[in-house]
Amino acid sequence: MPTETDKPPEALARENDELRARLIEAEETIRAIRLGEIDALVVTGPRNDQVFMLEGADHAYRVMVEQMNESAVTLRTDGLVLFCNSNFFNLLESPAERVRGRYFQSFVSPDDQKLFASLLEQAAKDSAKGEVLLKAASGRQIPVLLSLRIMRTGGPPSISMLITDLSEQKKSEALRRTAKRLAEAQRIAQVGDWAWDPEANKVTWSDQMFEILGMDPSAPVPDYGGQLALYHPESAQRLNEAVTQALERGGGYELELKRTRPDGSQVDLLVRGMTEQDEKGCPHFLYGSVQDITKRKQSEEALQRSEERYRSLFMSQLDAFALHEIILDDSGKPVDYRFLAVNPAFEKITGLAADKVLGRTVTELLPDIEPHWIEAYGKVALKGEALQLENFSTDLGRHFEVQAYCPERGQFAVVFRDVTRMINDSVALTLAKEASEAANKAKSEFLANMSHEIRTPLNGILGMLQLLQTTPVDDEQHLYLLQAVRASQRLTRLLSDILDLSRVEADMLHVAMDAFDFKDIMDAVIQLFTPVAHKKNLSLACHINPDIPSVLRGDAARLQQILGNLVGNAIKFTDKGYVMVEASPLSPRNHEEYRVLFSVTDTGIGIQDDKLHKLFKPFTQVSQGYRRDYQGAGLGLSICKRLVDLMGGNIAVESEVGIGTTFYFNVKLSNIDPQNEVTSTEPFRGSVLPGTLSILLAEDEQINRLFTARLAEKLGYRVVTVKDGKQALDALKSGEFDVVLMDIQMPVMDGVEATARIRAGEAGKDKASIPIVALTAYAMAGDKEKFLGAGMDGYLAKPMETEALLKVIEEITAKRQR
């Protein structure tokens, strides 16, 4: 067995140092005990640490600690209890031997372990303070305030701790919070509480009582008699009777009373009282509450008024109303429904009296009712699906609009209205609309037919007159021919005006937005009317503001039509002086829209003020004198106004009798990018000379066929005539032609069908692209576009002018050559 001498020298040296350190520590502990610097001795052994109190050590200090009202504890820096007074034993409800020598942490609530560890750590440096929960032996949790401080007496440092029990303080705080919450709840609920000791005649109020009753909170609480005086006499009497009865018999009471506050406001109160009995079972004390129910009473009164109004409405409404409850079988399927309420309108419309239907089922009243009605109403009552439909009652011979909804589960309400008259009116309106549309269609067809039927003979008349003008005639014959041509042209213009008006009224006239040269349009109007003005020795001038762009976008043709009507009228009604046309910008140039103001001024006869309102009405002239002295149907200005409206503008007039008249109008145009401005086209090269063209004329009217052929021949063309589209096809197959002038309405085969066959190559593949010009009396809105869309290259409306024929032939033949 090894001995101490067998150990290495280094191990023996370490053990020697440890023994010397223990000896020094023991000598220091003996010295501290002699000086009374420590109260307890902690001995570490196999059964954990043991604490031995040193009797007589600092006896005076321990006596003082025992007499304290608070718990006092001395801890080692790691939390071991070295000393504690009896108050701490009592606080924990544990004997001393179960406290001393244990770690203080064992008495701290688990939730506060971290907090206590932090306090212990802080106290080891200086001091600390904090609230924790301690666990008593009974399991009760004790809120305490810990005040810790480090103690250094020459030996190992310790921590002195005072413990203040906060239980009563916490209870007081909880009571204060409860009282505060109760007061706030009373304020929110507008409830105050009171108590009355009848023997002492002492009354106590909560703060809310003062506010409810409208009294100063600093005023004394009135006694019982004073409280009765707070209410209206009738309310005070009822309250006194209820209190007297409660004191005599016990129990409580509940009353609704009225009070007028000092500020004059009326308040409704719900007053409750309860008696408290003494040991003999006799009532001797009262307590209760007062609640402000003013708003509730107002709501109830409003609800009652609303119910009365709705009841009145229910009884007086013209729509029939019925409330039902659905009846289900054992499987939950709707099989019937019962009448719960009906209004007088229901009785009147159905002929069923209320006392005969209420409480009864529909199958009792209507045994033959179709099951789908019960099923449909069942969905309304059970699923809340609203139902709306129209129904015709064969029994009553009336149409009804029915609405059903679910006011609450298991019930459905039905509102139905007699719409027989509305249905009949709607049918009549539909028939009237159809009749109106048919009349409009008939009118349009009539206008189209009349236009065609008038233009066809007019074309022959004007054509023959123009042919006569090409023959040798004397001066008298020339004068007659000139007047006849002018009369025919005036008839043509009148026909065009009537058609234009019908197009506008039918909303069939559309405004184009094409680029045009502004100055060219103005010059064209002036050049057109200059010869007429010169014949009357009138000056016709035009001024264009230089700020107006040279190129704009809009409907040049309609603009020229408006200006032509106004200038023509000005010349017509002016015998001396001048006519001035002016144009100036209304808005600055921008990239969106551009407005131009036009004025046409004359020095003519003028118009009376009371006649100005007639100017823009169709078929109306200012006076009988105008109708006697001046030709026209009174359509020009009406068409002008409607065209101006279509172009986004307005028109106005000012006039003075004997001085003259000025018409103003503005239209909305738009700017055009300078890079895209209209440039004049070069004259086409290689234009076909008249003498080199061969024309095929398809025309069924003999006079028109003769006039057109002779006119073309006089212009130097070679002409072959046929009477219908089929002959045109045959002629093209066997001959060579440069242009086809194609009438539209012809027997055997019309012009549209003939064009389609030519384009399909039935006259020969080489003839499929021959230029075809529509020569027709169809001049209604859309006719030109329709014929061009059918494959034709040009369009000439009858009656035809010589210049128009020459122009259209040259244009399409030049286009083909390009």
Image (cartoon, rainbow, N blue to C red):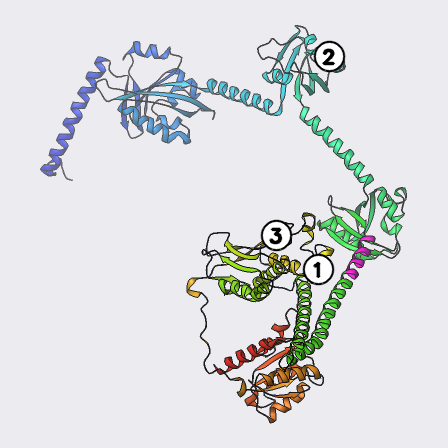
Q: Position of residue 221 (x, y in %)?
A: 62, 10
Q: Position of residue 598 (x, y in %)?
A: 55, 55
Residue 254 visible in image: no
The earlier-in-sequence mark between 1 and 2 is 2
- Magenta region: which residues? 421-432
Which of discs 3 and 2 lies nearer the camera? The answer is 3
The residue lying furthest to the front in this view is 475
Q: In this view, does 60 lie to the left or right of 462?
A: left
Q: How crowded is mark 1: few (under 14 residues within 10 Å), some or many (20 or more)?
A: few
The earlier-in-sequence mark between 3 and 2 is 2
Which of discs 1 and 2 lies nearer the camera? The answer is 1
- Asked if 456 appears above or below 220 in the picture, the reply is below
Residue 710 visible in image: yes
Q: Position of residue 766 (x, y in %)?
A: 54, 89
Given residues 365 and 530, the one toward you in this image is 530
* Residue type of the residue flagged with mark 1: Asp
Q: How far apart are marks 3 and 2 (CA)?
A: 109 Å
Which residue in the structure is indicated by mark 2?
A: 247
Mark 2 lies on a secondary structure that is: helix
Mark 1 lies on a secondary structure that is: helix
Q: How far apart are marks 1 and 3 (CA)?
A: 17 Å
The earlier-in-sequence mark between 1 and 3 is 1
Q: Where is residue 301 in the image (x, y as percent from the top left)?
A: 73, 28
**What is the quadrant of residue 446 in the picture?**
bottom right
Which residue in the structure is indicated by mark 1?
A: 629
Q: Is residue 738 left or right of residue 68?
A: right
Q: Mark on residue 660?
A: 3
Q: Quadrant of the N terminus?
A: top left
Q: Residue at x 83, y 53 (%)?
A: 421
Q: How crowded is mark 3: few (under 14 residues within 10 Å), some or many (20 or more)?
A: many
